[in-house]
Image (tube, rainbow, N blue to C red):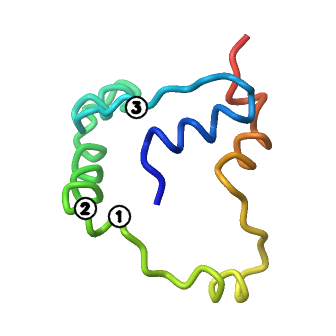
């Protein structure tokens, strides 16, 4: 499991620049991504996922899952490289 800072660091490798990931309370996250709505559903989802930290831990057998799925796993850095143009502002 990557922390926000670790995820930001891996995203930053693709465009070759630093990216920061400040810690934000759920209400602030909701205001940023609510697109003019109230953000209530975003806050509720965020709290349901992040308030009990054990939920963010995964005991999934990723190798078994990938054996059943017709996909190739992509790292955070690899995903950022694929979508670098969309993630980068000039």
The disc at residue 8 is none
Which residue is depicted at the point 46% across and 60% down? 1
Front residue of this view, candidates 36 and 54: 54
The residue carrying mark 1 is 56
Query: x, y percentage for residue 64?
Result: 64, 89
Disc with the residue nearer the chain's start (3 vs 2): 3
**For the C terminus, which image quadrant?**
top right
Q: Residue at x 35, y 24 (%)?
A: 36
Figure label count: 3
- Tell me residue 75's x, y (percent): 68, 56
Q: Earlier in the sequence, mark 3 or mark 1?
A: 3
Mark 3 element type: helix
Residue highlighted by disc 3: 33
Q: CA distance from mark 3 to mark 1?
A: 21 Å
The relative height of residue 22 versus residue 65 in the rendered view (above or below) is above
- Residue neighbourhood size for the residue with mark 1, other residues' Cα within 10 Å, grouped as few (<14), some (14–19), many (≥20): few
Q: Nearer the viewer, residue 64 or 5?
A: 5
State left or right for residue 16 relative to residue 34.
Answer: right
CA–CA distance in space, label 1 to label 2: 6 Å
**Pointers 3 and 1 in contact (CB under 8 A)?**
no
On the image, numbered disc 2 is attached to which residue?
A: 53
* Quarter assignment of residue 68: bottom right
Q: Quadrant of residue 21?
A: top left
Q: Are marks 1 and 2 in contact (CB under 8 Å)?
A: yes
- Front residue of 38/4: it is 4
Q: Where residue 67 sits: x, y (%)?
A: 73, 87
């Amino acid at each position: 499991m990557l922390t926000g800072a670790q995820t930001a660091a891996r995203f930053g490798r693709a465009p070759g620049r630093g990216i920061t990931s400040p810690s934000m309370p759920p209400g602030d996250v909701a205001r940023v991504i609510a697109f003019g709505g109230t953000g209530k559903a975003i806050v509720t989802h965020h709290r349901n996922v992040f308030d009990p930290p054990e939920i963010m831990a995964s005991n999934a057998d990723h190798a078994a899952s990938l054996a059943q799925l017709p996909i190739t796993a992509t790292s955070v850095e690899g995903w950022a490289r694929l979508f670098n143009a969309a993630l980068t502002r000039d």
